Structure formats: structure tokens, C-alpha cells
Image (cartoon, rainbow, N blue to C red):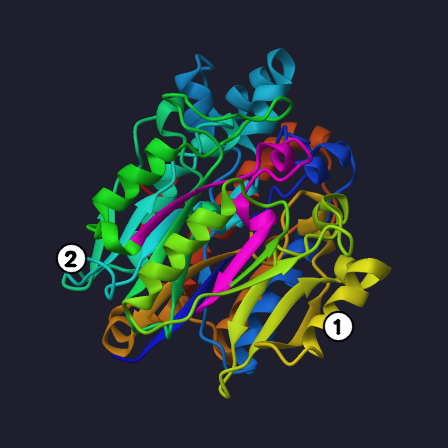
Amino acid sequence: MSAYEVNFDGLVGLTHNYAGLSFGNVASTSNKNAVANPKLAALQGLAKMKNLADSGFKQGVLPPQERPCVHTLRTLGFTGTDAEVIAQAAKKAPQLLANVSSASSMWVANAATVSPSADTADGKVHFTVANLNNKFHRSIEEQTTSNALKAIFADNKHFAHHAALPQQMLFGDEGAANHNRLCRSYGDKGVEVFVYGRQAFGGQVEPKVFPARQTREASEAVARLHQLDESQTVFLQQNPDVIDQGVFHNDVIAVSNGPVLFHHQEAFINQAPVFDEIRRKLGQFDCEFTPIQVPTNKVSVQDAVGTYLFNSQLLTKADGSMVIVVPEESRKNERVWTYLTELTQSGGPINEVKVFDLRESMCNGGGPACLRLRVVLTEQELNAANPNALMNDALYGSLTQWVNKHYRDRLTEADLADPQLLIENRTALDELTQIMNLGSIYPFQR
């Protein structure tokens, strides 16, 4: 059965700022206290979505979250009116206020793990919302994320939604950022590769500097929830040494598309036997595994992290060849750009590079692949999804106008104490839910 990969990009939120909250994410922490431009960030993301849609790729949009999250502050003991709650938090716990004001939901690669109907026992597309419990500011996203996904993929004949795994370190789950799917074509059965940073019950080496956010136990639980057959699943450990160099998710060191796994030489441990397992399991579907390994002597881990070369999108074009979507930082790095030039001229499956300016997202620690959630849909499933979440000329025009109307063009961490920011956020999101026909997905709407 034919199917499409639809990339649903996260719309950058109105409180986009550089509070440096994500320990282990070098870009996030190194830009702490810089002045952010939420309007530019949102427009840069929309420009990428529109360009890819115009290039013939299926493109969707996921909404941002309500921030600051006053509900969370209330559960932590702050009382009074919403303005008083924000004022108290700003005075007594400014770091808490920064956490509940984060716009990190823009990186929807962490929103959920998605398995297409071709792989699942019940023939439905399965979604498991990520619990993101390694970082407090992200762990508060799950309910609104779930509401948004259910509003876009509402038809239970085609879509199955699972709650986040328990909020406990044993089941640390970072969503699709640590999940790859390999297949001959999108509608065919494939092999789902779950990459993890540590095994909570021990027995394997772990990073020493930065935390490993994804556990094997979480990945195995998601595979069970999605009704995946063992013959179609593989579990692969990320190299703890690269985690300690700032590779906080697998999508900072590897990306897949179709039968291709584009990865760095140092991405994984025990790579050879696991790659043999992938090759064997793909073979049952007459699919030849195509790993493309980038050697360290051409692109160092430091260069990969600094340019987000692997936090790229690999997309299949109409002729079957692939284009790699990279941030402007990859073009500015001589070594990385030399490698990409050689790659596209090598006669392999990747023969084109698209470059986007995503500086506002990059400075906060997320590139092209962080901004999108891949959802494989058949024609029937695509028709069952909310059409108002799919990018086209009309939606692009509406969202661009919406951003220009509601977003600030300058925001610092100190500005988070402004109670007017909450009013601006709620006013904008209320209008957005009408534009995208999402219903009441936010706490303030209920």
C-alpha cells in the first residue's frame, strides 16, 4: 500500500527565550541570557515548512503550548490571581518561572513516538506521547501534546493514542528523537530501530558527564504499546562518549529515511552485530539496509554537534533520490560543507542539499530534525487527519499573519515576569485553535 511521510513541524511559541535550561545540550546552555526573537523564530520555522510543502513534500503543523504554565506554578504552591502567581514565582523562584515559560515544545521530535499502520498488529497508526522526565521544563508538556495529537488524529478507526510512560527515570522517554524506521518504501513493513542511552537495570556502560535521557526499558515499553513484532524491532545503544560531547539525543548523531541510516562513525556501541541484525530483519521484506557512515577524520563529533549535521531531515524526492535538509551552520563549517558536497556527488542515494536559516532554533539547541515529527500515513489515513493542520498557501498566509500580529520581536529571561506575556499567549493560542480547528486543547480554554 502506498503511503506518505508527513513531517509535522512544531510552531515556535510566543515565549521563545534563551534561559539555558537543558543541561547536556551545548547550544542551549552556551546561549543562556542572550536576547531572543520569538517572531523571527516562528517565521523561520514557517518558511521551512512552506518551502518543503512547495517542493512536493507532505507537511503539517503542530501548535505550541500555553506558557507560562500557571497551572504548574499553582501545583507548586503559588496562589492568587494568575498575575500574582507569576509575580510570586518571579520574586521567589525565578528559575521555576523560567522552566514553566520554556517554548521547548517547538521541538516536536520529542513530542511522541509514532509507528505506522504497516508495522502494527492492529493496522492503526500508534502514538505514544513522550514523558520527557529528564528535564522538568519538558516534563510538563505531555498533556497538551496529547490533546493536540488527538485533535489532529482524531479518528479511532485509524489512530491509537497512548498516554506517556510513568514519570520515573526508569522509563525516561524522549520520543521520536531516539527512534528510526527503516523500510523499502513508506507503505511497506519496516524495521523500527529504538536508540537508547542507558539500560536502567544496568549491565552497560553509561556516560560520565551528561545524562543519558532515553532508557532501553522505555523503548521496549513503547514497542509493546505499539504492538510491534519482535522480528521488526531493534534496540541499539548510543555511544556514551558522544553523549558526553553534547549528543543528547540520537537525532544529533544519526538520521534515517527509507533504507538509509545516515550516521557518524562514533554514534553507537556494538554497532556491527546490531547492524547485522537490522540487515537480516530488513531482508525479510526484500529491503537492503543502506548505512552511510560519516568518518571522524572528515567530520568530528564536535563539528557534528556544532553544525547539527545529523539533526537534518532526509526526504525522498519524486524520483526516489534523497535530499538532506540542513541548517545554515552546516554550510558555514568548511569541513562539514566539504563532506556534504562530496556526499551529494558520490552517486549514492543522497544527491541534494537544502539549507535553511534556523538560527533562533539552533541557538536554543535544536535544528531541522528537532522541529519535526515524522508521521507515515496512507492516503486514507491522511484524509482522516485534520486538514487544517496541513500546510498549504492558505494556512501559511494565516499563520504568518497570526505570528506578525501576536509575537514579540525581543524577549529576555527577565521579560518572563511580565504578566502581560501570559495574556498575549492565551489570546494568540485561542485564535490559533480556531485557525487550525483544534478545539479546546489548552487548560485556559477548559
Which residue lies under the disc numbered 2?
121
Magenta stretch holds residue 240: yes
Where residue 335 sits, quadrant-wise, is bottom right
Residue 138 x/y as whole percent: 49, 34
Callout 1 secondary element? helix
At which x and y percent is residue 27? Answer: 72, 40
Say whether disc 1 or disc 2 marks the residue closer to the N-terminus.
2
The magenta stretch is 233-260
Element type at mark 2 = loop
Residue at the image position 76 percent from the left and 60 percent from the top: 330
The residue carrying mark 1 is 342
Please name whichever residue, 94 or 3, is drawn nearer the observer in this view of the structure.
Answer: 3
Give the residue drawn at x 29%, y 70%. Answer: 285
Classed neighbour count for the residue bearing mark 1: other residues with Cα under 10 Å, few (<14), some (14–19), many (≥20): few
Indicate which disc residue 92 carries. none
Work out which quarter of the rendered image holds the C terminus and state it. Answer: top left
Question: Is residue 442 visible to us here?
Answer: no
